[in-house]
Amino acid sequence: MRVTRHIAWIGTVGALLAWGFVMSRFSRGSVNALSSPKAAALSVHEAVHVETIEFEGTFVVSDSDRISFGAAAPGQVKKMLVHPGDHVTKGQILALVEPGGTPHVAKVRFNASAESAHARELSAELGAALSDHQVGLAKAKGDLDRAISDRNQSVALAQAAMKKLLSGTPPEIIQQAQAAADQTRQLRDKAKALSDRDEHAYQEGWIARNEATASKSAFETADAALHKAEEHLQEVKKGPSDSEVQTARNAFAKTKAAQDKNVQAARDELKRIERSGLAFPGNNPIAAPPFSSPSEIGLKGKIRARVEIKSPVNGIVLKSGGQPNLFELLKDGAKWELLGYVAARQAARIRPGSLVRLPKDESGTVRAIGPPDPKTGNFAIRVSCLPRTDLGSRAKGTVVIREEPQSVGFARH
């Protein structure tokens, strides 16, 4: 009987020592697995199926968002102040037209060595005005160059951030999250085995209740850590949510619009200086309109007033100088669309609001599907996108279809 008690005592002591060794290893492993910054940010136990549908379409806008106009009277365009792609404001001068029948404008080349005192005075005023004009032009051109450089840099950074988000979670990050979840699951399984063993030992009377309770608490902690690691893995595999995608697109559009506004302001200032011509003192015989060069100045009273063509709205110049209308503008706030067609079986899988990738790292959303073409049976697809200047051009779009995730459960042992 005494030998039996000795054997039972030795077995109990050995079990306690083994349990303490395993628990110390488990604690160090758990801390290392869960304290990693990469593991803490990672995700998921759901599989997401992504499908893409490619189509080709044409960039269009509503006819009500386009406006064509020209000079009120026939004549010859003497100076074009804007070009296709420029943004203009209501009332801005777009071109100068010399009405038909205007007599030939006399031109005079001033010379500093002119014999008359009047000519010498005009020459001096011309030199001062030309110097000031050139300084203003140089400054305006420098401001425009800096604004364009800042715009390109800011838009490139915003576009890179949006592109990175739309590309989803990198495979290596998913692999790291999966490895962290697997390691946490192994620690949970070990803790479960220890808890079951200690519960059995307690039932047999080999250990005290508090020792069995400690083992069970360690298992519950490991089980909670496993659930947390699996939830992180799930988030990683999902990739960006629709709200995150929309936020990134809004941030890119906001950045681009702000930078474009700065560039346009610098461009308008440069055009204003170019149109203003040379500034002279109050009483002088020089006419005020802009001239083709400093040496070609019309005499006062011999230049017939030119007709100014002004923009009736705020918008983007689509065409200038063509016939029968001199200008074609796209109003601000116009709703751009990429209009294309897809097969009926593909249309059945597309939903309004689906993400569409476009050329030049741009993107849009599906606005509507249908109706079908009576001849081909293909369904129309309308994609809302950001304003462009290549109206009527064709481009390829890719619809991104994301199916509902399917759970992949983990069995407990």
Image (cartoon, rainbow, N blue to C red):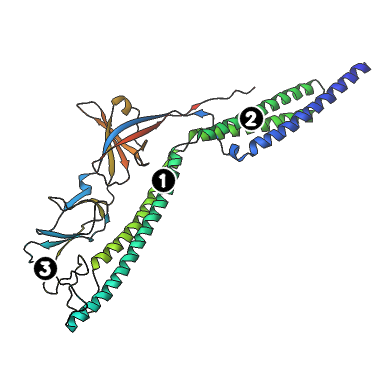
Most foreground residue, 254 or 208:
254
Element assignment for label 1:
helix
Element assignment for label 3:
loop
In the picture shown, does residue 384 fall above or below 193? below
Q: What number is the disc on residue 183?
A: 2
Residue ID for mark 3: 105
Which circle's residue, 3 or 1, is located before the other in the chain? 3
Residue ID at (38%, 48%): 253
Tell me the amino acid under the disc marked 2: Gln
- In the shown orientation, is residue 61 left or right of residue 266? left
- In the shown orientation, is residue 380 left or right of residue 361? left
Q: Kindly indicate whether the residue at mark 2 contacts the one at mark 1 (C-beta within 8 angstroms).
A: no
- In the shown orientation, is residue 309 left or right of residue 56? left
Residue 140 visible at all: yes
Task: Give the percent coordinates (x, y) of residue 181.
Answer: 60, 31
Q: Distance between the residues labelled 3 and 1?
A: 52 Å
Q: Distance between the residues labelled 3 and 2?
A: 89 Å
Tell me the amino acid under the disc marked 3: Val
Q: Distance between the residues labelled 1 and 2?
A: 37 Å
Residue ID at (55%, 31%): 175
Tell me the amino acid under the disc marked 1: Gln
Q: Quadrant of the image for the C terminus?
A: top right
Residue 280 visible at all: no
In the picture shown, does residue 400 fall above or below 325? above
In the picture shown, does residue 220 fall above or below 295? above
Task: Give the percent coordinates (x, y) of residue 141.
Answer: 33, 62
